[in-house]
Image: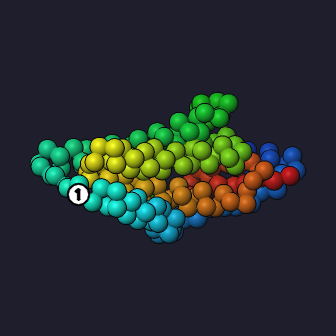
Amino acid sequence: MDAAAREARFAQIRADCERQGWRSEDHTISVVRANLMAFVTAGPAAVLCGTLYALLLPDSRMVWSWRRSALFLLLMLAGIFIHELLHGFGWGLFVRDRRSISYGVLWKQATPYCACSEPLSAGKYLVGTLMPFAVLGIGLFLLSLACRDRMLLCLALINILAAGGDTTVAWMLRGCRGALVLDHPTQCGFIAFRK
């Protein structure tokens, strides 16, 4: 679904909900502000994971070679796409129509995205929002501990910070319990609908 179609569907769903007596609340921020907030919402998790690793495995070393450097760069690039696929997977668990999930790039901000154009409960929306943080961030961190691998730790920390926009949206979801949440098609965040 292209940007114009996503925006038209968003406007239609919003109008339908408001006609049915739902009150809408805007919970969006600019991509720039979301990126700045990433350090506030995801930064502490990255610091905590790095500190835990250093405390639990003080004797582990970083071993780099050109092959490991190439692998690191490849995994970092793959992580960008996997991040968006994980959003789609998380939201896809709850949508009625899989075509409600779309992927693309906001070229003006050079930001890849995954969008869900179907309203979900706040809890279900949260699952899809935090899936990349959980899998690529915390999951890779736990794997780095198990493998005693600092390269995996670096990937985990990068992915935790890369999920900073998502942790910011998760922070914005507090207080939306009981609301229906509709992903915004062009901005970071969502519209919450309440009766």
Place of residue 9 in the rendered image (x, y in percent of width and height, measured from the top left): 66, 43
Left or right: 62 in relation to 101: left
User: Residue at the spot x=60%, y=56% of the render?
Assistant: 170
Q: Is residue 87 visible?
A: yes
Viewer-nearest residue: 17 or 40: 40
Quarter of the image that includes the N terminus: top right
Place of residue 165 in the rendered image (x, y in percent of width and height, measured from the top left): 50, 59
Q: Residue 177, relative to residue 121: is it above or below?
A: below
Q: Residue furthest left?
A: 66
Picture mark count = 1
Left or right: 10 in relation to 73: right
User: Residue at the spot x=77%, y=57% of the render?
Assistant: 24
User: Residue at the spot x=21%, y=44% of the render?
Assistant: 71
Quick one: SS at disc 1? Answer: loop
Place of residue 147 in the rendered image (x, y in percent of width and height, measured from the top left): 29, 43
Viewer-nearest residue: 23 or 46: 46
Viewer-nearest residue: 174 or 80: 174
Q: Return the residue at label 1.
A: 59
Q: Residue 141, relative to residue 51: is it above or below?
A: above
Left or right: 133 in relation to 73: right
User: Residue at the spot x=78%, y=50% of the render?
Assistant: 178
Mark 1 belongs to which amino acid?
Answer: Asp
